[in-house]
Image: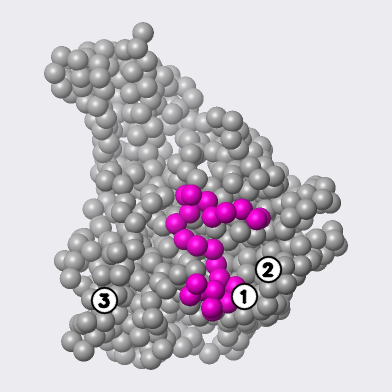
Amino acid sequence: MGRKILFITTDQQRFDALGCNGGLIARTPNIDALAATGINYNRAHPQSVVCMPSRSTMITGQHVATHGVWMNGVPLPNDAPSVATTLHDAGYKTALIGKAHFEPFLDPFLRFVENQLANTGAHSLIEDGHLHRGFDHMESASHGGMGSFHYAQWLMKNHPEAVPMYYRVLDMSLQVSAEGGGDTGAPQAHVNNIPREWYHTDWVADRTIAWLDSLDADADWFCWVSFPDPHHPWDPPASETHRVNWRDLDLPAGYPQNRAEREAILDNKPAQWRKWYDGEFVSNYEAPLKWVPNTLTDDQVREVNALTHIENELIDEAVGRMMKRIDERGWGADTDVLFSTDHGELQGDFGLLFKGPYHVDSLMRVPLIWRPAPSAGINPATVVAPVGHVSLASTFCHIAGLPQPDYAEAPRLPVNENEATELGHERVLTEWDSVLFGKIVRLRSICRDGWVATACMPGSIHEGTEGELYNLANDPLQQVNLWSDPAQKSLRDDLLADMWDHLPTPDAVRRECDAPV
Amino acid sequence: MGTVRRHAFIDSPADEVWALVGDPARLHDWFPIVSCEVVGKKRWINLASGLRFEEDIITLDHDLRRFQYSIVNNLIVKSHLGTVDVIPDGPNRCMVMYGTDIDPEPMGLIIIGAAGAGLEKLQEIFAANGAK
């Protein structure tokens, strides 16, 4: 028997969402316990700050330029490398339960396997002799009760009255809805009267436990558990909203309360920041087209944060239930647990919500925890060296006793600071590309030596000379852009040269975008 | 209004490709739909998800090798014009161009994604024909 692997991801969760990372509101004792007995990565970045590209990096071990899923709506090819395939070929039972999103969601033609599986009630597909993405078992869920997901099918069949209780994510123009709700009218805040046991977070945990229960005691397994929360809409079960009263919350440190101060910070950043804030340039599909951020109120920031904290608590409790079941099965000592998210959430920082072409900690600094199997005898540690999701595939293979796959572009995660140096974890890179009906934004970022540098490439509102440069120690909220500071020019140029040296070269022909998301 | 476009080159004479593309009742032979029905200037297409779209045939020009259609009576689509052109590129090669102008914009990405799959299917069909 080898080590088992439980890979837990959330969607759009900030680094500071967790108690182990300094979060003060949401109670996350189960995830905190993983961090206390494992390795907590203090500077982990995704390779993209939107779902499909980021998740494609997790499964392929490749940067965005290599796997080619350059924005949401671009499907990961069916024959792309998958660490689940590698593990399956090595004898592991494999499952993905929850949000997959390697393929577009909006798919009325049912062209994509993820959607076909849910619509037919199947849990796997063999294509050309290989399991789709390498998973024996796929059970999908997303942010509500509609769409081509196993969860939506289950809810419609068993509790149809609950389907309309969720926030309706898209409006009648197929745009991300700007409709406000809750107590403050915050966009995508909503009172959801669904019973907690029917909510997707608990369903994902239930289905994971059911799959674990289906396995033989001596099985080796890899289970990717992918919670759709705390991604908007912010609509946790109403029965749980007593946990955090938004009226009691302080405003987040990243939200300058003074409007003039807030706007001065935005004006010192490249154009996409202020233009979105004022509703003049919506470059991507990941935020509501009809919502203008400069209308955001202090109380709306409080309420969105409160609802997010509640969703994070529900995730933590689901994690606790799954860990308990693993212990009951007798696997506790031999199970590695990795916890992360695909990207962060602005959550009020700079007066903004949602996500977009904004390479700052709100979106780029993500929780990443590796609790090695206790039987491996690896000491707990905090690692401050920069690491990325691009190392996950190699890490899973390492746990399984396999070499780094040929397709993976980064070494495994280090178990301590010394090993970070030995393995070459010097820098982490993040890419952004969006082309939406003629609006083009392209960013490339590097984090190294306590700095983040972002180059804006030529596009609709950038000439190619703009960018951002932040000293993470002196400016943890990234409010002072040093890009144009003559005193930092040499450092900036060195960081950018290093970034261009290490970014893979994309294919000459960019793959097509097949859906908005 | 969103404007999107895809194209593909096919190593077959334009007239042969047009014989398929220019037949509105044979859409399901190359486009990722389940079936379609044509009655006069009306077409209904049935998608694998169970959705059914009603369309008006606007242009069917066998000389120009141009087909244009519009999705109508649809809760989501406010306005739409789809255009498929088959353009000769010498005697034994042609380009198929599929364009969509649509409100709401996001629907354009979905349709053109399907059109991309359709164009790939056309290439497969005519590559197989050529191999015979």
Q: Which residue is mark 2?
A: A372
Q: Residues within 10 Å of mark 1 (few under 14, many from 20)?
A: many
Q: Position of residue A385 (x, y in %)?
A: 48, 77
In the image, what residue occupies the spot 50% across and 80% down?
A384
Amino acid carrying label 2: it is Pro
Q: Which residue is mark 3?
A: A494
Label 2 residue SS = loop
Q: Real-space Cα distance between discs 1 and 2?
A: 8 Å
Amino acid carrying label 3: it is Asp
The stretch of residues the image draws in magenta is: A400-422
* Residue A276 left/right relative to B14: right
Q: Is residue A419 magenta?
A: yes
Numbered circle sitting on residue A505? none
Q: Which residue is mark 1?
A: A39
Q: Is residue A284 visible?
A: yes
Please give the chain letter of the residue carrying mark 2.
A
Please give the chain letter of the residue carrying mark 3.
A
Q: Are marks 1 and 3 on the same chain?
A: yes
